[in-house]
Image (cartoon, rainbow, N blue to C red):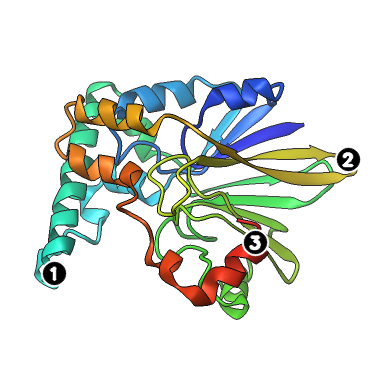
């Protein structure tokens, strides 16, 4: 069997060119910060044999009070305040869009995790950030092995698939393989390609094949700026290399990134 595992919607042409897949596993954060939330949800919901979990922003959109940024008295940096305003605008606009299309309950009712036992008996857990959590730091390149071991302790899985950080990672920690998908969109790293993975599995074992897909970033920016989104400049900044994580400025992590074959 082959399952496509994205963090958001990817270029389906890549899947078709590979011969298709048997199902889809989606890891959350589908539409909260994007210019076409309804279109994205309608497409992924219509896919055959698709399984979904929630991301933190899916929860924030349908319950705005859950978002920690709604505490302006704690923030004094002007740029941080501007980011909070842009995110707040996007969440509110998205809620209006998905509610108007009758998709808000679907988004609200998404489960925290998805579990699957592979034909070769490995136990797979998909969760957006980390076992038991759809937010927080997730699993990151700057985590030590001891920190990662603590994060997955007691997860009752052999493979933990995550997203959330928008930065890929593949690390064996004890008996648990931690595999961060990266992201299809809104990148936080210099590589702007859409990242996802294909899970190949049969009775003899499994293989996770990481895929990176090029697409027309200029066309995305044009679509953003021609949409009715209230913060088009903020959305476009992700595709203009303006939202790169500070992790990629750290020389001490270069060797670690290379060891993960990123």
Query: Do the residues bearing badges 1 and 3 touch, measured as CB atoms within 8 Å?
Result: no
* Residue 106: percent from left, percent from top: 38, 31
Query: Do the residues bearing badges 2 and 1 touch, measured as CB atoms within 8 Å?
Result: no
**Label 1 sits on residue:** 77
Q: Quadrant of the C terminus?
A: bottom right
**Label 2 sits on residue:** 203
Q: Secondary structure at mark 3?
A: loop
> Residue at coordinates 22% horizontally, 23% vertically from top-left?
100
* Residue 247: percent from left, percent from top: 43, 67
**Label 3 sits on residue:** 260
> Residue at coordinates 62% horizontally, 71% vertically from top-left?
153
- Quadrant of the rendered image containing residue 4: top right
Q: CA distance from mark 1 to mark 3?
A: 34 Å
Q: How many marks?
A: 3
Q: Earlier in the sequence, mark 2 or mark 3?
A: 2
Question: Which of the two discs, 2 and 3, sits closer to the camera?
Answer: 3
> Residue at coordinates 56% horizontally, 34% vertically from top-left?
51
Query: Do the residues bearing badges 2 and 3 touch, measured as CB atoms within 8 Å?
Result: no
């Amino acid at each position: 069997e082959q399952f496509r595992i994205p963090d958001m919607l990817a270029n389906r042409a890549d899947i078709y060119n590979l011969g298709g897949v048997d199902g889809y596993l989606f890891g959350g954060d589908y539409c909260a910060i994007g210019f076409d939330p309804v279109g994205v949800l309608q497409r992924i919901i219509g896919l055959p044999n698709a399984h979904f979990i929630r991301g933190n922003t899916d929860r924030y959109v349908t319950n705005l009070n859950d978002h920690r940024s709604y505490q302006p008295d704690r923030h004094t940096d002007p740029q941080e305040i501007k980011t909070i305003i842009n995110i707040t605008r996007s969440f509110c606009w998205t809620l209006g869009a998905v509610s108007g299309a009758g998709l808000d309950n679907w988004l609200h009712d998404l489960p925290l995790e998805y579990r699957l036992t592979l034909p070769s008996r490995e136990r797979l857990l998909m969760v957006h950030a980390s076992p038991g959590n759809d937010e927080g730091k997730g699993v990151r390149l700057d985590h030590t092995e001891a920190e990662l071991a603590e994060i997955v302790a007691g997860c009752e899985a052999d493979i933990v698939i995550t997203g959330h950080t928008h930065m890929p990672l593949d690390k064996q920690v004890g008996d648990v393989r931690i595999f961060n998908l990266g992201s299809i969109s809104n990148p936080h790293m210099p590589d702007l390609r859409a990242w996802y993975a294909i899970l190949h599995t049969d009775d003899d074992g499994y293989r996770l094949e990481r895929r990176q897909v090029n697409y027309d970033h200029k066309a995305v920016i044009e679509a953003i700026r021609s949409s009715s989104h209230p913060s088009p400049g903020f959305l476009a900044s992700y595709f203009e290399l303006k939202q790169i994580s500070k992790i990629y400025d750290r020389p001490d992590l270069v060797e670690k990134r290379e060891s993960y074959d990123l």
